[in-house]
Amino acid sequence: MLPKEQIESFIEECNEDRKKTFVEFVASLLKDKFVEIYLGDSYEEISTEQISTAYPAVFSGRVIGAYRECLIISSAYIDKQKKPQMGNVMFINERAIRALNEVDGNGIIEEMFLRSRESVQVKEMFDK
């Protein structure tokens, strides 16, 4: 996880420039880092009689860079032998991105989706 101070410093630099797009900012901050990108789609939805659970679909890969509104990543994929591989270059329009997270062992996007009542519990736990 990037330190809060480093992120704040980088934001100040970008505010002075004011020419960076969202993905140019992200690409500069997370260059060569492994990320997951959520576009708002579900990978699968499991339903029982009373409960339906949607699992968010994400793209994963290493940030290569950005060009204007296009984020470029070296994407992970599953090959025909069902083995994870890397290296499929993917171009993602920034307008499609709903959330982006560095994969660093501090939680994945799926774990960050909370019910509203859980937000209160989290606040009470960490707002001390």
Image: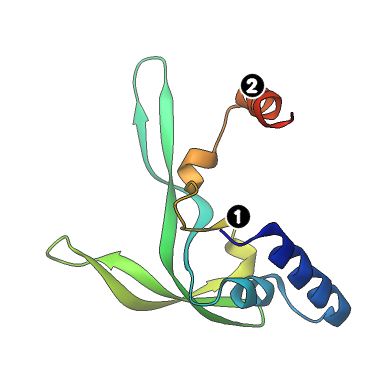
In which quarter of the view is residue 126 placed? top right
In which quarter of the view is residue 116 placed? top right
| Image spot of residue 92 (x, y percent) | 53, 71
| Image spot of residue 40 (x, y percent) | 53, 50
Q: Residues within 10 Å of mark 2 (few under 14, many from 20)?
A: few
| Image spot of residue 94 (x, y percent) | 62, 68
In which quarter of the view is residue 66 placed? bottom right
Q: Residues within 10 Å of mark 1 (few under 14, many from 20)?
A: few
Counting labels gives 2
Q: Which mark is residue 98?
A: 1
Q: Residue flagged by tag 1: what amino acid is it?
A: Arg
Mark 2 or mark 1: name the one nearer the start of the chain.
1
Q: Is residue 126 above or below residue 2?
A: above
Q: Which mark is residue 2?
A: none
The residue under label 2 is 117
Q: Is residue 125 above or below residue 22?
A: above
Q: Is residue 70 above or below residue 100?
A: below
Q: Extreme top residue here?
A: 50
Secondary structure beneath dot 2 equals helix
Where the N terminus falls, by quadrant? bottom right
Q: Extreme right residue here?
A: 16
Q: Is residue 27 above or below residue 107?
A: below
Position of 70 with respect to 25 (left or right) is left
Query: Measuring 84% from the left and 82% from the top, which residue is drawn there?
Result: 17
Mark 2 or 1, closer to the camera: 2
Q: Name the residue nearer the viewer: 128 or 98.
A: 128
Position of 84 with respect to 18 (left or right) is left
Query: Measuring 70% from the left and 58% from the top, which residue is drawn there?
Result: 4
Query: Measuring 59% from the left and 77% from the top, which residue is drawn there?
Result: 70
